[in-house]
Image: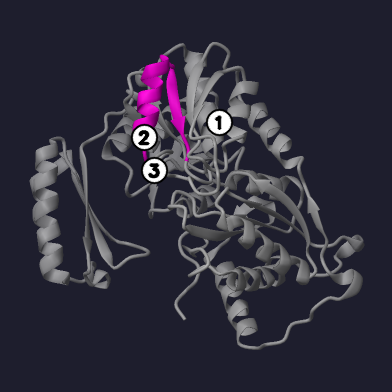
Amino acid sequence: MGRLFGTDGVRGVANADLTAELALGLSVAAAHVLAETGTLDGGRRATAVVGRDPRASGEFLEAAVVAGLASAGVDVLRVGVLPTPAVAYLTGALGADLGVMLSASHNAMPDNGVKFIARGGHKLSDELEDRIETLYEQHRTGAPWERPTGAGVGRVTEYAEGFDRYVAHLVAVLPNRLDGLKIVLDEAHGAAARVSPEAFARAGAEVITIGATPDGLNINAGCGSTHLDLLKAAVVEHGADFGIAHDGDADRCLAVDASGEEVDGDQILAVLALAMREAGQLRKDTVVGTVMSNLGFKIAMEREGIHVVQTAVGDRYVLESMKAEGFALGGEQSGHVIVLDHATTGDGTLTGLLLAARVVATGRTLAELAGVMQRLPQILINVPDVDKSRVETSAELAAAIDEAERELGDTGRVLLRQSGTEPLVRVMVEAADIEQARSVAGRLADVVKSALG
């Protein structure tokens, strides 16, 4: 059996790859690994917070997860449709032993995923995921486990207060109100369709929403952070100050300025880094990015006296670096931004609120603030059906990379990396001139095909 856990939980096509049986079995295993099932010290029972995005499949998968947890003796608080960062926040704020979020994030509607959250609202380490997977496989192949009966089974409670508690937390974080700001919010017909507009409105902004009528089938469908055209048009049409786009589970935030120009995760990170340093909150004057962060971001931060630490791609690796070194801010170009003093994971609504607060506090437009960095042209080519395991060992490929790096000099860079989920290699080239970037990337992609095909 291949590893079930990917870079962010267990994902697949709902009812084909991700079945009710798998969700139930994983939840039983997670209960045993992440919570001391049964009665804890002081008579307290283990507790789990369970939430989901609006996908139709989330309804039956939620039922399976709740059944698995309760059958293992865990009390369940069902919070309903809420963003992933809300479930993480509530897991910590309520002192729960674990949390479970059902979502496939920015993926299309047929997919879904099970994401487990540890005590305190933190993502799982590889070691904890491996333990859950091992125990799941043991149970699946017949290993017995002690099943509580009678009063020992878990109880299931609706926790409707989760919505207000999370929104109140978001608004309380803001350094200033958003009065006078007109904002368009694209909710991707996803988990933040109620939360994000409510939070912005409570903070004083005039809110216009699109993509905020989820029906279980339309999540991420031509809208949200992976499809910005609707938001760009809406911002211009309504004469808004700017727009914010989330993905299906609202752990991402991308923006669009008043003229309809995209403001990506690197630019948002740069704006927030300067704001936090000004407020004395940017610990060690350092921000954490990934190897995919635009070179323009690193150049801008160094110019402003802010150090940049780069990790592997994935917000979990950004978070690991932040926690290990005590950094306060990190994120990805895709819009995952982590403000560790207020969230344990990327939080798209919180990011958008903080960005809006900076616009109001400075009296500058989003375009002016984002202008702190200039994005270098970046070309990304996915090369499929190759032996990605030989990226690091191919002499032919190494020679081609050396030649490309000499050609680009200090004005660009090359990055080749294996996909974590598909048999392909990603070729990324940045250069001051987009035609040069396109040419170099094309040549490297050809070498990848010939050397690794």
Q: Residue at x 10, y 39 (%)?
A: 435
SS at badge 1:
loop
Q: Residue at x 31, y 26 (%)?
A: 261
- Pinpoint residue 283: horizontal percent, then vertical percent: 52, 36
Say which of marks 2 and 3 sits in front: 2
The numbered mark, 1 or 2, whose residue comes first in the sequence reads: 2
Q: Residue at x 41, y 30 (%)?
A: 255
The numbered mark, 1 or 3, whose residue comes first in the sequence reads: 1
The residue indicated by pointer 2 is 228
The residue indicated by pointer 3 is 334
Q: Residues within 10 Å of mark 3 (few under 14, many from 20)?
A: some
Q: CA distance from mark 1 to mark 3?
A: 23 Å
Q: Residues within 10 Å of mark 1 (few under 14, many from 20)?
A: some
Q: CA distance from mark 2 to mark 3?
A: 12 Å
| Range of residues picked out in magenta | 226-246
Compared to residue 210, the image places residue 429 above or below, namely below
Mark identifier at residue 299: none
Q: Which quadrant holds residue 119?
A: bottom right
Work out whether residue 350 or residue 246 is closer to the camera in this orientation and state it: 246
Say which of marks 1 and 2 sits in front: 2
The numbered mark, 2 or 3, whose residue comes first in the sequence reads: 2
